Each structure stands twice: as structure tokens, then as C-alpha cells.
Amino acid sequence: MNGIHDMGGMQDMGPIHAEKNEPVFHAPWEGRSLALNLAAGAWRKWNIDAGRHQIELIPPADYLRMSYYEKWAQRLEELLVKTGLVTQAEIDSGKPAPGSPKATPPLTADKVPAILRSGGPASRNVPGPSRFKVGQRVRARNINPTGHTRLPRYARGKTGTIHLDHGAYVFPDTNAHFLGEKPQHVYSVHFTAQELWGQQASAHDAVYVDMWDDYLEHA
Amino acid sequence: MDATRRGFLMAAGGTAANELSQAQDHDHDHDHGHQDVPSDPTLRVKALESLLVEKGLVDPAALDALIDTYEHKVGPRNGAQVVAKAWVDPAYKKRLLADATNAIAELGYGGRQGEHMVVVENTPKIHNLVVCTLCSCYPWSVLGLPPVWYKSAPYRSRAVIDPRGVLREFGVDLPQDTEVRVWDSTAELRYLVLPERPAGTEKLSEEQLAALVTRDAMVGVGKVKA
């Protein structure tokens, strides 16, 4: 989806405000928002790609206005309703529907260290050789899917070189929509700054973008 | 927040509603409505938590444990130890650059948002900078949760098109002939910059070196100073 989240290359977002000695959370609710997302995620009703896409679906003006953990809270409410864990009426009233059964949380405090330790590896075994080799010239396809994609607009149609083959990983474009993992190779692709941004860019600089096989074609 | 929602929170008489009414009183009394007024997200997140706890969907003790982990246990000190070890142990550095995930696991770090790590090395001629233009991907296992600026539109948008300008905003002015490599974290690989070891630190211990290493240097927006 060509959304506001895909902002690489925009120039009008203002100066960077780096806060000195920034706390991990600026208010207790920020930590709760993060933790609620992780704890509710333990129901495994969605995946990391669906979670990212849900944030992308926040309307652009809200996306820019809302703070990070506000977006996480909104994303969580929407995922909970979409996957049926909670109804919209329950979100609106703040109360469980009368007579609804009480569940048992999958993530308890004692399991937190182990679940963070194991994480959620996205690598998969895919037999057979990869389509592209290190050093090969490739072009990022000019595609404009209306769903989730991790191919940034600034790289589409640009030509680069395979820098590394990272191995095979879950494909977000399908996984975000529960259409399967479709695992495939991910490559680090080297683009010169001048290829991406024109002759005014430094001849010394480059951007490396991680790209799934389906994003690439031979150049 | 819509009127129904605010009405519910006020009517519920719970902590959130009390805070809202206190905030309004406060505003009345002093008329300096700014940052000490609880914002809507405070209420929204409290309401969501109480709903999920009441439905048995989340365990409040698990929430506390998650928050405690990222406030106190996982942070840039982890990454600093990785960097310091690489500076003093050439064999470790070699392993780190070849297979970062396993080399970092040797120090006990890994897991969530550090499952697949890549370490990129700064040299006198090469400067690396990490960004996630599409969202906020960041190596949690070695750096903790990302700071606000890393997740902000100004950084995400400009890091790829004007990395030298971005670096100047962080006080790093690179020579024209330095090669700047920007790593856009578009997939599940997470990047950590191995900064240059500063001159004059030859006699420092690994622990003393780790104390010099900053989060910013490991994202690539700073340099390590002796």
C-alpha cells in the first residue's frame, strides 16, 4: 500500500528531535501499551506482519499526529476486534459482554523470560538454490500492491547489486493477510545513492535494502 | 476520544475516570493546561487493559514483567558489551562480522527483535547508519526499545536521502570522501553498527571500553569518544 508509513526519501518532516537521557517510557501508559500488545499477541491470532500492516492502516493524518504507543494501542484494539478476541461493543463500553466466558491468559509472568528469549524467528528452510547470486545486478520491480509490502517506494524500478543472500524468510506480503508464509530468499541489495536520488547525491554513498526474491528481477 | 467513550470512563468511576476529572479540576484551578494533564491515551490504554484483564485475555503480572524487562534488563548496555568484546578480541570480532546472531548469543543476548542479526563495521573510510523507513525495526535484544527520534518521521524519511545532513544534526560531520552506507531494515534482519574504537583507549579494560559505547554510536548517528 502506498501509504504515509512508506516515508523514505520525503524531505518535509522537519528537524530530528533527539532527547537527552530519554526514558524508556515517557509515561506508564506507554509501557502498558507495549506490554498489552506483546501479551495479547501470545494468543497467536495474528502475526508480526499483520500487526505492522494494522499500523499502516491508520489514516495518514492520524498516523503523523499520534505518538508511537498510541498507534500501538489503536492497532491492538483493531486486531482484537478483527480476530474476534474482543467485540467492538466491548471496546466501546470497556466491559466484557454479559455472560461472556472468562479465558485463561496464555502468557503468564513466569513465561515472559522464555518467550522473549525464543522470540519469533522468521527464517525458514527452502530447498534449492537461490535465484540471485552475490554480485549480480538486479532491479527492484515496480509494483504497487494495495495490501502490505516491505518494498519501499523509493527503491522501486531502481537497479542495484546483490550484496548478501540472507537465506529464506517468511514473505510479509502474503503473511500479513493470512495467505501463507510463502518463504523465499531475502537479499541485501546495494543501491548507489545516485541511482536512488540522482546526480546531486554523493558518489560515495549507498543504501542497502533487504528485499525478498519476489521484489526483484534480473537487470 | 468520542463522547460515548469519555462518558463511559467518567461513569465507570474507575481510576481512569478519576484521573480525567482530576485533570479537569487541575486545569480549572491553574489555567496552564499543558503536559501534566493526562492525555487521552492514558485513559484509552487503562480501559483496554481493564477489559482484557477482566476477559482473562492478559495477565497483569505478565504486563509488569514485560515492562520491567525493557525498563531494566534489556538495553544498550548489552550492545556495548558486544562492541567492547569485538574491540579487544579479534577472533570474536571475526565471528561477529561473519555470523552476528550466534556471536551475540555467546554473550547471552538474543531473542525477540534480535533473532537475525547483522553487524556492520565502521572504519576510517566507511560510516554505517541504520534506519527503518517503513516502521521502527530496531535490534531490541542488544539496544532495548528504540528512542522516539528513531521512530519519528524526520529520521525515517531523511536518513536514506540525506544521511550526511541527518548525521550533522547529531553532531557528526563526515569528510566528503567517507563512504556512507545506510541500512534500511525492511526485512527481519536487525542491524548493529560496530563503531570505531577511539584512539587513546589502548589501556582500558573491556568493561571500561563498554562504558564508553553509546546507543547512538551503535545506530550509527554518533561516534564513540574516549
Image (cartoon, rainbow, N blue to C red):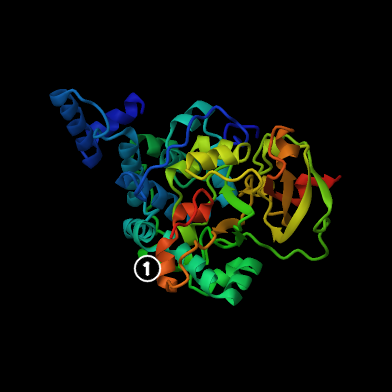
Locate the C terminus of chain A by quadrant.
Answer: top right
The residue that appears at 60% across and 76% down in the rendered structure is: B91
The amino acid at mark 1 is Asp
Q: Position of residue B52 (x, y in %)?
A: 37, 48
Locate the N terminus of chain A by quadrant.
Answer: top right
Q: Is residue A99 visible?
A: no
The residue that appears at 57% across and 49% down in the rendered structure is: B130
Q: Is residue A137 visible?
A: yes
Q: Position of residue B30 (x, y in %)?
A: 15, 25
The residue that appears at 19% across and 26% down in the rendered structure is: B27
Judge the density around disc 1: few (<14), some (14-19), many (≥20) Cα neighbours within 10 Å.
Answer: few
Q: Secondary structure at mark 1?
A: helix
Q: Front-most of B223 and A41?
A: B223
Q: Quadrant of residue B204?
A: bottom left
Would you name the residue on which mark 1 appears? Answer: A110
Q: Is residue A69 left or right of residue A189?
A: left
